Amino acid sequence: MAQEDTFKKIVSHCKEYGFVFPSSDIYDGLAAVYDYGQNGVELKNNIKQYWWQSMVLLHSNIVGIDSSIFMHPTIWKASGHVDAFNDPLIDNRDSKKRYRADVLIEDQLGKYEEKMDKEIAKAAKKFGDSFDEAQFRATNPRVLEYQRKYDELHARFANAMETSNLEELKQIILDEGIVDPISGTKNWTDVRQFNLMFSTEMGASADSSSTIYLRPETAQGIFVNFLNVQKTGRMKLPFGIAQIGKAFRNEIVARQFVFRMREFEQMEMQFFCQPGTEMEWFNYWKQYRLAWHQALGMGNENYRYHDHEKLAHYANAATDIEFRMPFGFKEVEGIHSRTDFDLSQHEKYSGRQIKYFDPERNENYTPYVVETSIGVDRMFLSVMCHSYIEEQLENGSSRIVLSLPEPLAPVKCAVLPLVNKDGLPEKAQEIVDDLKFHFNTTIEAKDSIGKRYRRQDAIGTPFCVTVDGDTLTDNTVTLRYRDSMKQERVPIAKLREIIEDRVSITSLLKKLDVKE
Ligand code: ATP
């Protein structure tokens, strides 16, 4: 099945089974804004809980905050967002569609990569076990030619982005012969800068000093609370502040479902450390965050780091953790070493001294910062994409199963009375009333048992418990496992023990190796 078709199916599955709805659905939606439904919110909350606990619970030197979305407008001047949080925008005159010039060029780079991959896959098939990819890359004329074009374009693009050279970006698009995917033409306008922050007015007066912004990232709420937390929490370096919250960006092109939204949620942690130790911490967080992803068991081969060669002027190291989505490897999380840029800027703009007094060194200095920043919605999407499976069964039928990591599943256990009479629903309810204190448990009595299994498979419920006539006499039930569909007879008294261990967030946390 083409990857694009799979993605479309995942989007409609999300709607059909109460995971994600278009916002304002009965008014035909609002572009790039989505609502999470009854199952989506559970999955999302589990992701947030896993993140929060892995950061705040497992690290005694990390604490959390919850800062407001509205902040003093000067914060966004100090952070550089007012002047530089821009995307280069270009329109196609024929389709009247708007694009990000940098994304058009990145897609073109992706095409060269795809061409190389195709040549390599072809050769690997032809030569079998004796295939040496490194040698093939170094000698095959076609691959070398694509690599040369890729390198040339990459260097030109990086230079144009770094110097904000908008004419050059347009020239690259023309020189590469990039056409609008809709109109197929090269009838492009000039490239312009577009600021991604949403603004609004605060209070009744409409002068420009009352203009405030919806935060485009949660990080600044942490920086401006650095002193508050450090002093009231008597925090010693190194320490971190974590936060989960909404962020808003007026994205020019909002594509790919919840991958790029205008209102989304971030989980960010700023780790404050002594200058000179930041690379050690950068490497620690780089590894820890990847381990966090990998503990979910979604295949280590589906993750990769993408180290940034071109860094923002204030950063001295940066990497993305990318996940293999149906539309290619894409950034899910960023890890950045930001030096003392943010705290120094806020010191300059606020006129307050923002320093740390180090009792061991007996001096004041501005801490350095390593941040980890992950989008809840992108994480949600990666989990959905990986878990959605259309399976052909041995008996010739098929099923759709959401093979979610068990601790993230919205419902952990569904209790199903075989028939909706003869005391079975009451017995099933008794089991639910016991298990519901420990994990999310539901009861479903309508339809045939086969249909109910399919419905639970489709929302990713890892365990189904069937209550039948024998249950009433011997207090045993049939336990069915989602992925293997295996069934076994177990005593009701054992259910909690069997299920709880596998579905708890703790089971994930135990896989993480924490440096304290
Ligand atoms: P991109 O290059 O894809 O626009 P970014 O590099 O601007 O992303 P950051 O500013 O580093 O992203 O934000 C950190 C994280 O927040 C990203 O890794 C991503 O998971 C998430 N994120 C950023 N923008 C969006 C968005 N518009 N919709 C959903 N998630 C987002």
Image (cartoon, grey):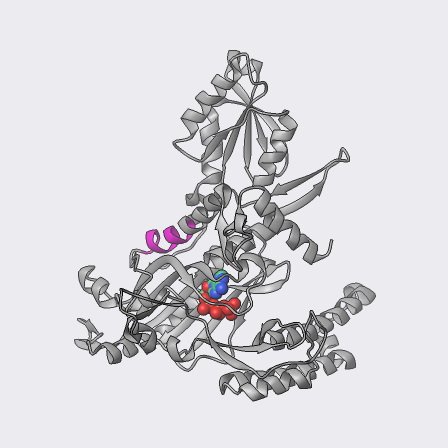
Residue 13 shows in this picture: yes
Indicate whether 472 appears above or below 505: above
- Considering the image in quadrants, where does the C terminus appear? bottom left
- Farthest residue to the front: give it: 205
Closer to us: 467 or 481: 467
The picture quadrant where one finds residue 62 is: bottom left
Residue most extreme to the right:
126
What segment is highlighted magenta in the picture? 50-59
User: Which secondary structure type mostly characterizes the magenta part of the structure?
Assistant: helix
Quarter of the figure with residue 273: bottom left
**Residue at image location 55% in from the left, 14% down from the top:** 421
Q: Horizontally, is 97 left or right of 415 in the view?
A: right
The residue nearer to you, when weighing 363 against 134, is 363
**Residue 348 drawn at (x, y percent):** 25, 80
In the depicted structure, whether residue 262 falls above or below residue 429: below
Work out whether residue 409 can be spotted.
no
Is 58 contained in the magenta span?
yes
Above or below, 38 against 236 in this view is: above
Percent position (x, y) of residue 418? Answer: 59, 20
Q: Is residue 456 left or right of residue 143?
A: left
Residue in front for this viewpoint, 271 or 107: 107
Q: Residue visible at 45% across and 60% down?
A: 263
Q: Nearer the viewer, residue 163 or 433?
A: 163
Which residue is at a point 70% across and 82% down the rendered structure image? 177
Give the image location of residue 98, x and y in percent.
Answer: 59, 72
Residue 128 to residue 192: above or below: above
List x then y, in percent, for residue 63.
29, 57
Q: Image quadrant of residue 230? A: bottom left
* Residue 158 covered by magenta stretch: no
The number of discs equals 0
**142 sits left or right of 176 in the view:** right
